Image: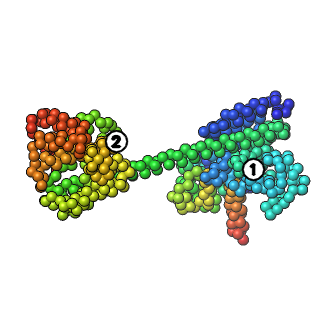
Amino acid sequence: MKTLLVVDDEPEICDFLKLFFEERKYQVRTATSGQEALDMIPKVKPQVVLLDVHMPGMDGLTALKRIKETYSDIKVIMVTALETREKIEEAIRYGADNYITKPLSLEYLEKDVREKVAHLAGEKISQRE
Amino acid sequence: MAAKGDKKSVDFHQVLLSAAQSMVRLKHPERLLKMITRFIDAKVKLSHTSFLILDEKKNHFLFIDSKGSRRFPVSLLKVDMDYPLVEWFQVLKRKMRIKEDYLYLPQLEKWSHNGRYRYTSQTNPETFEKIKKAMSDFKAELVVPGYYKKSLIGLLLLGKKTNDCRFTPSEISFFQILTQDCSMAVKNAQYYQDLISQNQELETRLHEIEKLRQKEQETYYQIMRSLAQQVHAKDPYTFGHINQVERLGMMVAKEMKLDLSGRQKDILSAGLILHDVGKIGIPDSVLKKPDRLTPDEWEIMKTHVEKGVKILEPLTDFKEVAEIVRSHHERYDGTGYPRGLKGDQIPIEARIVSVVDAFHAIVSTRCYDAGRPIEDAFQELERCAGSQFDPKVVEAFVTAMKRDMKKRGVGVWIEEDQGHS
């Protein structure tokens, strides 16, 4: 099962992306803060996390750092309305697998998530071999 | 135009008319587009109603608004120019020779099964599949375009009707006209905004240019003023001359009740200060000659008038001042130089300069003539009134001077402000 965790402080965006990816046969869970996401990861075991950068409380970059420290095999795609070079560089340093700016193209988002999952599957197969 | 069945739910005709009417010359149509989106959502009962508008600067489409249970988060999404729905209305529809200017899912099914459409390098049976997928991604049952001069700038996406009924032709044509009107309104508003910002930019630039020009002219004026001072510094006998000439000239103008409002005062003042600025171009051998000048030397001396005018030429604001400089050696009877102007042909400011300059020359200690008492100077001016000088100016000058002297003490001529302004 392809499992996706959507993290965004706007419930409307969480709901929309949940529905969108569920229709594409993903199991989708949502969180509205960085802390909530971190708490959910051990249970949900997502392959891909869509992570908003600007959130009250723990922001996306901090959450990214924590996720990558503990679960290096989880693919994290940063999603943000802001794109300063510093933020992008920081995200890449923490190990972000992609950085998508809002407004985003649904087509691109879907393709990127699909590729990340496929990539993970590929890695698993090569590990087994 | 509405079919009978529609009238119960929505009077499209009326809505359309009022929407179209209120959109003419709207400065901020976004609010109205939101209202229309909400109106459709409330009246037509669809899974969603979404309005996309082209962001020309970013070159993609953005949601103006989205309503309904399957609405889209407006800030999250964009639609790129190469997205199948956009491409369809921009290019593909024409390539495939499809007349209908909308995409309606049931009809799309028919088209794709029909197979009689023209396929090119850009279009093939899969085109329909791409379109279907795009419509499914956006949960759209009906997609209606809006154009401005043949280029797509608006897209109305309509979800399924909640009662599962199909859209009627009259509904579709209603949405077509509505989307078209909305797109035109958006485009007009953009043009209007562009125009305003262009105008503002232009005004700011003009203002800057004007400021620069003024600054330049001020600088030039300062240079000339110091030049004029230098002229008189070169001529030790008339040291302090220009400040005196300016003061006396203004006094005469006031006595004559000339209009000194606005620039007039500055023009007169500059004329009084700068009338001899051309002397900077006269050789010292002539300018400082202690003896009387030979006729040739006089001719050279006279050129200071034209030289002064030349110096003032670069100053567009100083046309009138240049005219005063050009005319300050004209005589009232027409025998002066350089043009032999007569009476009122000579600017009044130049007639004043002429009197004040002559007076100052008479009372100052000159190399060729010892300074004479003021009464002598008055007599001299009065003697020449009507020939060299304008009698009205002489009269005003003498009157004003006498009053001024009385105030300061009878018979005393004080050279004030010598050497400084």
The percent position of residue B165, horizontal first and vertical second, equals: 84, 38
Q: Secondary structure at mark 2?
A: helix
Q: Residue furthest top?
A: B8
Which amino acid, by three-letter code, is at mark 2?
Answer: Arg
Q: Which residue is mark 2?
A: B263
The picture quadrant where one finds residue A83 is: bottom right
Residue B304: percent from left, percent from top:
26, 57
Same chain check for tags 2 and 1: yes
Cα–Cα gap, marks 2 and 1: 71 Å
Q: Which residue is mark 1?
A: B137
Is there a contact, CB below 8 Å, between mark 2 and mark 1?
Answer: no
Residue B309 position (above or below residue B393): below
Displayed quadrant of residue A32: top right
Which of marks 1 and 2 precedes in the sequence?
1
Q: Is residue B375 left or right of residue B174?
A: left
Q: Nearer the viewer, residue A86 or B174?
A: B174
Left of B154 or right of it: where is A59? left
Q: Mark 2 belongs to which subunit? A: B
What residue is rendered at 53% in x and 58% in y? A85
Image x and y of residue B143, in percent: 77, 46
Residue placed most toward the observer, B133 or B12? B12
Identity of the residue drawn at 13% across and 59% down: B290
In front here: B12 or B196? B196
Q: Residues within 10 Å of mark 2 (few under 14, many from 20)?
A: few
Q: Is residue A4 visible?
A: no
The residue shown at (86%, 58%) is B118
Residue extending furthest bottom? A129
Residue type at mark 1: give it. Asp
